[in-house]
């Protein structure tokens, strides 16, 4: 094997990460596929690097709306990880989460929930109870329950995610703001407007500290609060928050 090939593959993979983070999905896909080709030619068929490449390709396809293609790549990654890694390795949890996400994007909610729950069970064994990835699993499960119109279970899982974030993250971390926002959204749809307002306000307070004033998530907070005030019949406040959202948008 050419000793430079792994370095070339790593370079392609790093390029893919950069393109992916910049939203240049076609370029990211090309880079990840070139890395995969090198690994498949020069490594054993069940090497973890090959699984990681499939996972990367799946993430790009998922973000491009090609959810069926993403699912195939995620499933291939999972097959390899099952052979190459211990049964409760965190990478397996990531693979289950990714498959769950693809199913959710395809509207297959029951399958999504099954994979999210498998990811959570691995996380309970492989990770500390307050690891941020555990919060991610609870958030994913909550989102599925919300899609299933089970607001009480969604709320329970979102609150578990918040408990973890409060231990694992700084007090003004954007992920904590998003978690509070999620809880507010569920309360709003349950008609519990005063509780929804409390969580929306907490989310906005953090975002004002953690984010630039024109960040899209600031507009999300203002729009959510505007919609809530409209439901509450406070139209002047609703208009004020809609205007703040429009200024950002």
Image (cartoon, rainbow, N blue to C red):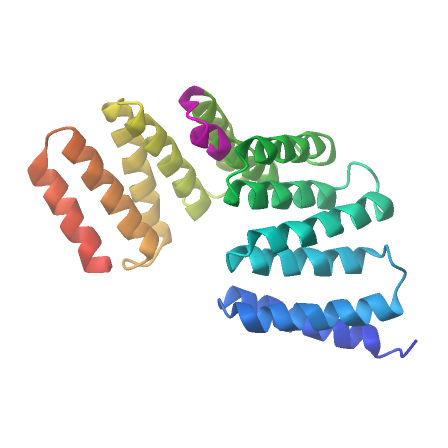
Establish if 121 lies above or below 220.
above
Boundaries of the magenta span? 143-152
Residue 123 visible (yes or no): yes
State the quadrant of the C terminus: bottom left
Residue 90 shown left or right of residue 15 in the figure: right
Residue 41 shown left or right of residue 72 in the figure: right
Residue at image point 21% right, 52% down:
245
Establish if 2 lies above or below 147.
below
Q: Position of residue 44 (x, y in %)?
A: 90, 60
State the quadrant of the N terminus: bottom right
Q: Position of residue 182 (x, y in %)?
A: 39, 36
Residue at image point 18% right, 59% down:
247
Residue 173 visible (yes or no): no
Q: Is residue 149 magenta?
A: yes
Establish if 160 lies above or below 46.
above
Magenta stretch mostly in which secondary structure? helix
Of 1 and 181, nearer the camera is 1
Q: Is residue 51 magenta?
A: no
Residue at image point 53% right, 67% down:
25
Of 147 and 244, nearer the camera is 147
Residue 155, picture quadrant: top left
Residue 131, picture quadrant: top right
Residue at image point 73% right, 57% down:
52
Of 11 and 70, nearer the camera is 70
Q: Position of residue 85 (x, y in %)?
A: 83, 45
Q: Position of residue 150 (x, y in %)?
A: 44, 22
């Amino acid at each position: 094997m050419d000793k430079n090939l792994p370095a070339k593959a790593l370079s392609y993979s790093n390029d893919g990460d950069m393109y992916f983070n910049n939203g240049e999905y076609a370029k990211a896909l090309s880079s990840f596929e070139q890395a995969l080709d090198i690994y498949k030619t020069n490594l054993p068929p069940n090497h973890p690097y090959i699984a990681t490449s499939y996972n990367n390709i799946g993430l790009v396809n998922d973000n491009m709306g090609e959810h069926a293609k993403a699912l195939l790549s995620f499933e291939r990654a999972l097959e390899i990880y099952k052979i190459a890694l211990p049964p409760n390795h965190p990478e397996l949890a990531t693979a289950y989460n990714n498959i769950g996400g693809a199913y959710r994007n395809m509207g297959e909610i029951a399958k999504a929930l099954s994979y999210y729950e498998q990811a959570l069970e691995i996380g309970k064994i492989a990770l500390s109870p307050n690891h941020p990835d555990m919060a991610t699993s609870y958030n994913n499960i909550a989102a599925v329950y919300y899609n299933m119109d089970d607001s009480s279970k969604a709320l329970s899982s979102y609150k578990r995610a918040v408990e973890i974030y409060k231990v694992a993250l700084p007090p003004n971390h954007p992920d904590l703001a998003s978690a509070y926002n999620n809880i507010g959204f569920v309360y709003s749809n349950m008609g519990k407007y005063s509780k929804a307002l409390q969580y929306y306000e907490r989310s906005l307070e953090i975002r004002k500290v953690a984010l630039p004033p024109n960040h899209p998530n600031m507009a999300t907070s203002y729009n959510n609060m505007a919609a809530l005030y409209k439901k509450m019949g406070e139209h002047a406040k609703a208009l004020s928050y809609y205007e703040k959202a429009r200024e950002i948008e």
